[in-house]
């Protein structure tokens, strides 16, 4: 991994361009997400938290109505729409740049109508055959993540010959599919999918070789915040118990700084303020001094 990136992260058409790595605040409007399920389920609470994320320095707010924690069941599409649409609309009307975190094309269509400006599909278009067509027609940025199956299946599929090479190959296939469907290259973002059909060792290997994804030429989104592999690393030294999800943010900030230094375009985090500070430090560190 490079110590400090030599040039600013790639930019994405239609999204903020502050000249540094972006910070995306997580807003889960679900009852069962792994670290904050149920906290922001009601629209008023979600809008209040979204506003707080913006105040803390979020460049984007990622609104999701389906938990993707291992073992989670999928909600009906009507329930997902009920959860996300008031929040997307309210934040968009308040001037926020909103991302819709969903694997369903119907949810994307409705969320874009409500003001969303970015599609974050953790399946990379595999979960819904209409997704890439909808993204291309809408001409909005599209995050394509490495994915091997829904939450009830993914832990059994965390088997690789060489995780970095295999993820690059499989994610490359999703890039090809998106481009073939008409998604424009300047609107395509990639995500190596930390924690999705990955063990902790797989996640660390992908982070150690993040520069291989950055060198691909597409903007890279890194989403490590509060994930299990951080809790395992930061386990209680006496009991061996993993650190609880809500106590992993300090480790997540370290990942934010290192990923920004490696050239990540954006970091998806639950606790925005520390990572917003970290990316500004990395940006300043990477500039040549004058005088």
Image (cartoon, rainbow, N blue to C red):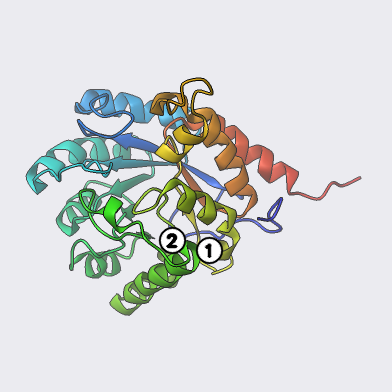
- Tell me, for residue 190, which label it has, or none: 2
Task: Say above or below: 276 vs 8.
Answer: above
Residue shown at 57%/65% (left/top)?
212
Image quarter hosting the C terminus: top right
Quarter of the figure with residue 270? top left
The alpha-carbon separation of the residues under discs 2 and 1 comes to 8 Å
- Tell me, for residue 116, which label it has, or none: none
Observer-nearest of 204 and 62? 204
Identify the secondary structure beneath mark 1.
Answer: helix
Task: Say above or below: 14 vs 96.
Answer: below
Point out the tag, 2 or 1, that comes first from the N-terminus: 2
Residue shown at 51%/20% (left/top)?
238
Q: Which residue position is annotated with label 1?
A: 213
Q: Residue furthest top?
A: 238
Residue 230 percent across, percent down from the top left = 48, 36
Residue 20 visible here:
no
Image quarter hosting the N terminus: bottom right
Instruction: Answer few, some or many: residues within 10 Å of disc 2's Cα (few below 14, many 20 plus, some between 14 and 19).
Output: many
Residue shown at 31%/54% (left/top)?
122
């Amino acid at each position: 991994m490079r110590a400090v990136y030599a040039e600013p992260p790639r930019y994405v058409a239609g999204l903020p361009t502050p000249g540094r790595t972006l910070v995306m605040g997580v807003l889960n409007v679900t009852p069962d997400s792994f670290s904050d399920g149920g906290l922001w389920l009601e629209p008023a609470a979600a809008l209040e938290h979204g506003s707080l994320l913006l105040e803390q320095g979020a460049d984007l707010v990622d609104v999701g109505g389906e938990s993707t924690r291992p073992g989670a069941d999928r909600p009906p599409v009507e329930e997902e729409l009920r959860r996300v649409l008031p929040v997307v609309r309210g934040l968009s009307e308040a001037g926020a740049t909103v991302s819709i975190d969903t694997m369903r094309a119907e949810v994307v269509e409705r969320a874009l109508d409500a003001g969303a400006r970015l599609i974050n599909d953790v399946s990379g278009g595999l979960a819904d055959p209409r997704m890439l067509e909808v993204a291309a027609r809408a001409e909005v940025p599209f995050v394509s993540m490495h994915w091997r199956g829904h939450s009830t299946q993914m832990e059994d599929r965390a088997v690789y010959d060489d995780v970095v090479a295999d993820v690059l190959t499989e994610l490359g296939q999703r890039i090809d599919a998106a481009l073939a469907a008409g998604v424009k290259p300047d609107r395509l973002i990639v995500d190596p999918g930390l924690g999705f059909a990955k063990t902790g060792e797989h996640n660390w290997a992908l982070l150690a070789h993040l520069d291989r994804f950055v060198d691909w030429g597409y903007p890279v989104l890194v989403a490590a915040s509060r994930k299990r592999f951080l809790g395992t690393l930061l386990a209680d030294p006496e009991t061996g118990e993993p650190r609880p999800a809500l106590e992993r943010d300090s480790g997540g900030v370290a990942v934010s700084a290192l990923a920004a230094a490696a050239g990540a375009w954006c970091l998806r985090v639950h606790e925005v303020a520390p990572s917003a500070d970290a990316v500004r430090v990395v940006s300043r560190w990477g500039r040549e001094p004058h005088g």
